[in-house]
Amino acid sequence: MSSPNEQEGADEKPAEGTPADHSSVQESETGLPKESPAGGEQEEDVEQVETDTESIADDLEEQDNTQVSLKEGKSPEKEEKKISETFFYSYEDIYSRPFVTEDSGIPINLLTLKYSFGYDCIRSVNLMVMDSQSLLYVAGNQVVILDLKTKSQSYLRSSSGGGIGFIVAHPTRQYFAVGEKGEEPNLIIYDYPSLKPYRILQGGTKKGYVFGDFNHTGTLLASIGSSPDYMLTIWDWKQEKIVLRSKAFSQDVYRVTFSPDNEEQLTTAGVGHIRFWKMAHTFTGLKLQGALGRFGKTAVTDIIGYVELPDGKVISGAEWGNLLLWEGGLIKVELCRAGHKPCHNGPVSHIVLDEGELVTVGKDGFIRVWNFEAIDTADSVDETGLLEMEPMNELRVGRNVSLSFMSKIHDCGQPFWYAQDANGRIWKLDLTFSNVTHDPECLCTFHSGRIEAMSVSPMTYLMATTALDRSVRIYDFISNSQQSEIKFKQGGTALAWAPHVVNPNGSVIAVGFEDGVVRIIEVYDPKELPTFAGRANIRNAEINLKQAFKPHTTAVTALAYERNGDVLATGSKDKTVFFFAVEDEYKPIGFIHVPGPVQALQWSPPSHVASMLLILCENGYVLQVPAPLPEKQDTASTYHIKNLPTEYFHFYSIKSRIKLEEEIALRERKKQEKEKAKLEWIKQLQEMGKEVEEEEPEEEEEEPLPSIYIPEEPSPILCGFYSAPGKFWLSLGGYDSGFLYHCAFSSNEHQEDPENRQDEPFEVIPIEGTDDNPIHQISFCNSRLLMFCGMQNGALRVYPLQDKDLSVNTLKAYWSLSVHDNDYGQIRGICCSYDDRFLITCGGDGNIFTFNILSPEDVHEELKAKIPPPRRGLEKEKAAEDIEDPNACNIEEVKQKREYERIMKEAEDKKSKKREELIALRQQFLFLLQKNQELPKHMRLQREQYEMDRRVFEELNMQTAQRIQLVEKELAWEHEKHLIGLQKLQNWFRDSLEFDTVIVHAIQSNHQISTYRLVAISEKYYQDKERPSWKKTVLKRAWKKKEKRESIRDRKPRVVKREADKLKTKVRKPTTCFIERKREQIRRLVEKSDKEKAKIMKRKEEWEKLYKSKPSDDYEDPRDVQAIKEVQENMGCYKLKTATDYRVPQEKYMNTEKKTMQLASLEVLIYKKKVNMNKQIMSLRDFKVSIIEEIRCLLQELKSVQAALDISERLPLPLIPQLHPDEVPEKRFEYDRDILLKFKEEQAAKAKLQEQLEESPSSGAFRYSLKSSDKETGSLQQTASSDGMKRSSSVVIEQQKIFVIEKAEPTEMELEILKREKIKNLYLQETLINKINELVTNFDAELRFLRHKKLQLDVQMKYADLNYITWFEELLILKNAEKNENLLQGHVNTLQSEQEAMQSKLNSYLARMEDKKSEIVKLQECEKALYASFQASLGENNEFAHFLTKVLKKKFNCVKKKVERETDEKDESEEESDEESSSESDEEDSGSEDEIFDISVCPENCDKALFQNTIQLREKLLDIKDALIREKKVAAKLRKEYNVLFEKAKSIEASLNTAEKELDIFQWKKQQKLNDLYVVVPLKLHQVEYFFNGEIPRDFSQALVFTNQSLEYLQKRIVDLHHEKIMQREIYKKAQKQYKQLVRDKKEMEITIQRLEEKCSQLMMLKFGRVVDFEAVQARSVNIRLEELELQIMEKEYEHSQEIKECAKRILDLEQKLMMLTKENTRKARQLNQFCLEKQQLETKLDSLKDDWGVEFQGPRTADMKEKARMESQLKRLAHDEAILREEINFLSRKDGHLIEQLSLLTRNNQFLQPSSPQDLEAPDQIFPVLKP
């Protein structure tokens, strides 16, 4: 295959985009973006991925880091050549061909594709419409082009053989792209309809393409790669260049699309993510920037379908069926249907924006059309983020439809849609939604999902397939058509076409299903059936269910007919194999258990002597069993075959050992080659004549051999077949793949446990390329010359067999072709036609392919499939009964159930016989008892005599007691449970009741009154009502206490402060009267000047205030404004609340809390009223009870009275009123054990009646006899008790009779007394009866009165209930609106707070700006003052004035300042920059003349002082200017910030106004909702004043309801307003007159002011000679500062005089001290002189006594000499001190100002003047010793 550049003679490939930017942080060295972990992508809010254009050659081939720059890439030397528009590749050069082993002789066209019957409908997008008659879809390694008219197919094979990832059509339908799979796959652009390869794109991904999309103009193509790189690539596909590329995500990406309105925007979506991409132009080139969408509160979902909207938003679907509206990388709103129903019941698979309508396609089979504008402007209304919306139109395509994708095409000018159904259909839809809309049309139907099983007819060219889509289909692979289809309740998993020995017609098929059912179906030609009237639509073939049975509990995995056709074997995942006898009706033989799930079943071929079944299990077990004989199996109780001879083989892995042996052989071979090379080298050296020293061979350290590995889980057996009796071949998956294993069953008769077996194959054949791609299916042609192998990767292999036996040599050469999908299209079945002309394969990708074996040119005769004819009598047979329940019992379970029922029936029969015997014995015993009773008493047997043994009864009683105890223990938990249940019921239903329904009945009438049934009201209502008052009282008390404490605290500091002030006045330093007077004088002057200034300022302020108070032209009196405001607030709004301009006042805003309080207050009021009435009724009942008691007492008294009267005189006794049960309902809950037992008996009787148990008549009679005996005993007891009562009464009567008889006849006195007693008794009788009647009458009257009150209360309660209902409905509305209202109110509050904060900021900025303005003004004044001082220093007519002015204005050489100034100028405003630039230019112009003079040197004859002053002023001027510039910059910056804040304040104010309007609108809408509620207003006829034609209308909808007070107020208000209007007119007239008078007064005042001003100016001219500022004169009349300085001088002189006095006083003290010291010194000197004289006298005496004594003491003494010297020195010091003292006295006498300094000097030099301790004063002798003469 030649490239386009080679075709055109180019030397290089076309350059593929611009080079990558190495500065990009997120790119790898090869230019690809670095892969970021998935967690980082999910944590980042918006991740930006920027990639650059890059070279394919550098990226994929050379992997070089060096890349050419953009300029070099565009240089003319390396100008790239473009691919011609007319260039095409050759399809023959690029499509993948079959692989054939070299030198094998196998023809390349061994198999040729004939037709594709399947459809991979599980792919998300596998449908492409090029025109109205052609559909394209992917089938394995082919793109199928289906002609809808002819149903013919054409094919495009993949170029790599690795599969096809996607197909997508160009917007013009002129091209379509095919993205392939495999290593470094291609992306091929085909031309349509020529189907020529137009462009081949390479290097876009590593393993396979997933999806692709053209942009709207068709110039660019975007593709997405699969794992591991997930690369997003943007192609300039016509030039085969990569424009941009980036990693899309770290998980599976499903789709990528361009935005139809902005080609620089893309969107990708997939597992748990959606990403929004932009192609941005940066300074480094074109970049891809990806922003990951954030789900926020919404649950993360896989996104399959989405669409880009024109404004950049994106609508995507969710797994739960709702729509998500994305904006700015966030979910703006989630759309659902009304009632929070999802938009679709399942994932949204595809979304289309078509002609302004949004169309969504769902997995639920619905297509819904939505209002695009409503969705585009949608926004969430509450915190849930959901928005309810209904579709405009919807179409349900059909039942059991799962739509995945839709494509639009125009057919004859009318739009149609072709839809892909994941359940195996392609639909043609009309979405016009009009009267002439076509119904959905199913164009094609296929299997859905993988094909589970396939089989070919043994008689004709028919094949049958089944899948988990619950269908079985029959295909004619000659005419390439589907003949028939039948649907069942469960999916099919296995299928076998019965051989011709079973059915010669070839019409019977056995199908296994996933619920364990096996169905026998038959195919027939319905045309051969007898025709009858009304039959139409006769198809080519029909399928009839012949028989259904369920041998297994789980999926059937294998079916196999025995070679003679006598037995059918079925295998299942439930580890069983079932055998059936094949007859007209299949009959079960039995089943066996196997060690694992059955993978495959195969009967031994006819070449084998015995008919054996090979059973392959998934977990590595292989079994061999013979065909069981039906007549030898006992199926009476079970179908389990226990004694069937079974041979086991448990595969033991040997692959590791094989690898080890290969490694050992390889190492040995390498060692031999090394030895051989060494010997040749030695031989060469010897030939060259060199001596070779024999060296000891160094032992090389070899790598350790790999250890033997046995997988923990056994490798699954995939397929196998017989090779010889007892021998078989196996293909395994997992670790042991890569070989065919030849195995044999053990010949040992004694088989050990299968689980402990470790059987190894005796022969192994390695299969090339199957280590990771095992063989799943093996099949042979009928002649067994070809072996077909179906691989895991969907490839088909053909091995030619020469000797019909497998060996290493025969399996070396093979033919291979990738047919099905390489990822999930493993081959599930391979079958040859009965004549070996055709081969059929089916795979996991849902595809079915038919192939011609050898070239179709070899077939010369026409072939045709013949459909089997129907059986005789088929049309008369009843339909076979199917098993539709997936949980139905299997054959064995049915058998076991029947056996169990049989055993249970036998047991019941035995029990019934025993019961009949017991009943007969009981009847016999009762008959004996009856006979015994009929005997005379002395002959009867006692009850004890019937007891044969007393111990038996004791034992029975003990057992009964134990049983009772046991039952009590067993029922303890139940007893406690029911007790707790009763307590809970009482707590819930009774304790919560405060009043139950009590009905009080009248005594003499039928009147009655009942209480209200009330539930105890919650305490929170009372807490809410009572708490505030309690709080108020407590708070008042606390407040009063706090006030008292604070008053006490305030008093204490005042007292302390007064005392401190007093102390201060006492301690204050005294001053002289003169200074005090002077100070007082100055203070008065200051006060006077301050008063004058204050007057002036006050006058100014008054003027300013007056001018400010001057009203403007549009001034309004505040009183009027306030009055208008009060009127507006208080006059009331009488607009109807239903009016459009009605606005709810803020004080009348109603929220949930207020409404809840209203309801609570109403409920409490209702409750109190009802409680009050209940209390009255209960008191009435208590009154009735007391009346009954009183009547009983009266009746008792009446009876005693009537006892003394004759019977004829006795009046009838009144009846005692009785309490009805409903008057005391609390007694219903009073119970005891007897009541409970009676209730239990009643319940048991009811249960027995409901249960319809069949009982024998004898047992019923026995029970009746027991009941009758009980009744008899009860009646006997009752008669006995009544006899006793009668006897006692008769005794009493007899006693009375005896007493009467014993009495004597009465006397006259006694008769008179008896007469009086009689009269009294008659009166008492009448009185008591009247009293009783009066009590009854009064009670009835009370009841009627209370009943009347209750009726009135009932009416009020009804009104209250109606009001409550209305308020509750309002509460519901308020609750629904509460969230939105809170959000709006919160928004308004937030904006108000922001506005306040912004206003405070603005005020602060204004204050700072004012400060800066004042500082700038000060600096400008300083500058003016400096110029003024400079002019003053120059004087007049200075010849150097011009020069010095230039010096002053000359800038300093301050480079740093200049640079700073230039940098700061960038931030200044334009006006300031212009002013500064102009000023600088002026200064520079002025400075341009400095070339004449050297301003740095003072010229001659110029005053140097003036020059230096100018230099200094220049420095100050520069500082002032710099400060001025800085201040202006700061001011400008403040102005900018102020303007920004002002704009923000404006926006906040606008937002606040908008928010307030929204809140008002919301309140209005809420009010309208409240207005929609119906309010019941009961009215009487006299209250109705709304008439129509003199009659009351039927419709009151236009009527208004007013209270009488409101109506009277309105009528009164009309009169008041009329009077008020008259009064306001009078006030207006008065105001007009007043206004005219004020105008006249104003003119007169202006004239007066002008005259006074003229007079004032004349007086000033007379006094001062000119007009002066009198305020300044007043302010400057006294120099306060001078007066203060004079006062300070006086204070200082006073202080100095005081110090001089202190010093003089101190000098006097020192003189006195000196005099005292001198006297003391004189006294001491005299004493010393006396001692000296005495010493001389003593010495003379001694000398006279003895001249020799004291020789040692003669001569001068050293001690005396030292003492003398010391005394002399001290004397000198005293003399010096004396002189100093004299000088000090002189100083003091002069009163010199330096006295203090001299004194301090003296104190420093003479420390003896100030003794430091009292010891110094006490020892004056040490200081002034007496000197010797």
Image (spheres, rainbow, N blue to C red):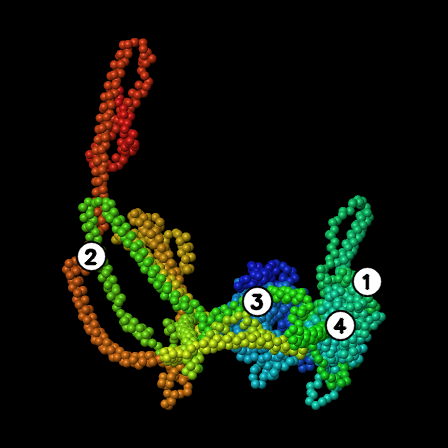
The Cα–Cα distance between marks 1 and 2, rounded to whole angstroms, is 144 Å
Q: Which mark is residue 1301?
A: none
Is the N terminus in the top left, top right, bottom left or bottom right quadrant? bottom right
Q: Which residue is mark 2?
A: 1674
* Amino acid tagged 3: His
Q: Is residue 1347 shown left or right of residue 725? A: left
Task: Pick the residue in front: 1575 or 1494.
Answer: 1575
- Mark 2 or 4: in front is 4
- Mark 1 or 2: in front is 1
Is residue 889 shown above or below 1424?
below
Q: Which residue is mark 3?
A: 975
Q: Which residue is mark 1?
A: 750
Q: Which mark is residue 637?
A: 4
Residue 328 location (% of width, % of height): 51, 68
* Amino acid tagged 2: Gln
* Amino acid tagged 1: His
The Cα–Cα distance between marks 2 and 3, rounded to whole angstroms, is 112 Å
For the point 36% across and 80% down, which residue is it?
1602
Q: Quadrant of residue 501?
A: bottom right
Dot 2 or dot 3: first in sequence order is: 3
Residue 293 location (% of width, % of height): 54, 67
The Cα–Cα distance between marks 1 and 4, rounded to whole angstroms, is 29 Å
